[in-house]
Structure formats: C-alpha cells, structure tokens
Image (tube, rainbow, N blue to C red):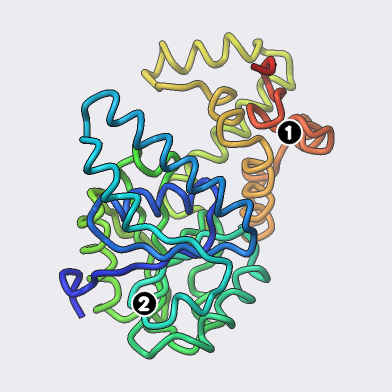
Amino acid sequence: MNVEEIKTVGVVGAGSMGTGIIQVAAQSGFEVKAVDVDDAACARASKAIAKILERLVAKEKITEEQKKQVLGRISFSTDVATLKGVPFLFEAVFESVDVKKAIFEKLDAICGDEVIYATNTSSLSITEMASLVKRPAKFIGMHFFNPVPVMKLVEVIPALQTGQETTDLALAMAKKLGKTAITCKDTPGFVVNRLLVPYMLDAARILEGGVASAEDIDTAMKLGCGMPMGPFELMDYTGVEISYYVGEIFHNYTKEARFAPPGLVRNMVKAGYLGKKTGKGFYDYPAK
C-alpha cells in the first residue's frame, strides 16, 4: 500500500489534537471518518473546524466552495465500527496506556490486516503500545504538534516491532498532510519534548526560587533567545497539567531529576490553575 492509494483515513479522538488532524487530513483531500465516545466532543470538533475554515475564507486563503468541500469530507460518529475498512487510522485519545489499550482492542476486533495504526502520543512508549495490538508491524508513532494546522513538524517514531514499510508509509503520509517529518527512536519524549519539558519545568524552578518573575523570565526567553513564546506563556497555552503529567511519565521512566515536576507546578494542578482553559495559570485570563 502506498499513500496515493489511501483515500480515507480515520481519526479516533476529537479533542484538540484530534480536531487538528481531522482538519488537516480533510484539507489534504482525504475523506475523514472521526470517532469519539462523546457526542459533545464531536459537536465541538465540528464547530471548531468550521470556525477555522470560515476565518480562512475571510482571509481569502480558501474559497467558500473549498470550505464546503473540506467540511463535506468529514463525518463524525460515536461508533468505532464506522472505521471498519479504513486503511490508515490516527489515534489521538487521552494520554494513558490503559485508555489507548481499550481503544486498540476495539479497533483490532473490526479492522483488517492491512490497517495502519498511527498513535499521536507525546510521551508514552510506542513499543509498549505496539505490543498491545494484533499487528505490531503495522503500528507506529506520529506525533503532531499543537495547533496541528499551523505547526509543520511531525515526529515519526517506529516501535521496535514496526515494519520498514509502515515507517515509509507514515513518512509519506506526513508529507501528504503538508508536514515535515523527522524520524526518531522510541525514547521518552522523542526529540522535542525530551528538550522542551525539562526546559519548562526548569523555568518553574527558577520562578519558585524567586530568581525572577514569570513575566521577566518569559521576556528573557523571547528577546534573549528569539522564542515566539516564553515558557510560562507556553505552559498556560498548552495546559499546565500537560507539563506536569508528561514530566511525571518521563521521571518514572528515566529517574532523571530534571523531569520531576517542581512543587509549584504540582500545586497549580491540584488547585486547578491549568492556564487559559481555566482562566488562571501563571497568568490570569479574564473571562470574555
């Protein structure tokens, strides 16, 4: 199977990452069958994609007709059985091996032998997840970045069991989706998060130690290092709990102190100060 033979893809999970993958795949010409257990999540994803496409029409990036065509290529369902016969499936559910295992058990029961599973995990072991499915040679990691329609990178991570044909197909799929792909080994955090998570946690340690304010640390990294966002702006944008949970996963796996979330981050998660989504993180976000 080559990427040009694939006309339909599936996306399991309609959260922020899944929604982005759905949009990009539909804009790239694929028919997209999206599945989530929650009707409300499906409705949110559909509305979010329509809103983004409307903005693109307003900016004259696409036409009204193109917007209709993209939306017409997307279908949502809460029934995993709708993915039967789909040759390439992206999985973007909650970052938990147990949750993902339950999904793959359902998919294994309905999918054919040729289907490719591409997990969007940012922190879990691809090899461990491949061991949970019937066809581990057809299993691979494809880690997209948020927001998916904007960010150009995809990390392609073969498991120990992944066949070379699967890796080649994943790289071709990333290119078809308009992304630049890098290949990396199945190690905690792959490339980007292996560097980014301890950077953000170190910033929290500096803040916790009273070295400088959050605003000044963000300003230092933006103006001193040319970064588009400072570490606290970034954590508030992605969700403070993401840095916490991913740091915990890495620390449990590697036992390296640099991955251990500092007390400040731990307490913010306990308090529900998760960033923009809750109205408060390292900064306050007044309700509009």
Q: Residue at x 64, y 76 (%)?
A: 102
Residue at (21, 26) in percent of width and height: 60
Label 1: which secondary element: helix
Q: Which residue is mark 2?
A: 86
Q: Residue at x 61, y 54 (%)?
A: 250
Mark 1 — residue?
Answer: 265
Quadrant of the image for the C terminus? top right
Q: Report which quarter residue 64 is drawn in.
A: top left
x and y percent of residue 3 in the render? Answer: 20, 70
Residue type for callout 1:
Val
N-terminal-most mark, 2 or 1:
2
Q: Is residue 221 above or below residue 93?
A: above
Tell me the number on the disc at residue 189: none
Question: Number of callouts in the render?
Answer: 2
**Real-space CA distance between mark 2 and mark 1, rounded to the nearest whole angstrom:** 41 Å
Q: Residues within 10 Å of mark 2 (few under 14, many from 20)?
A: many
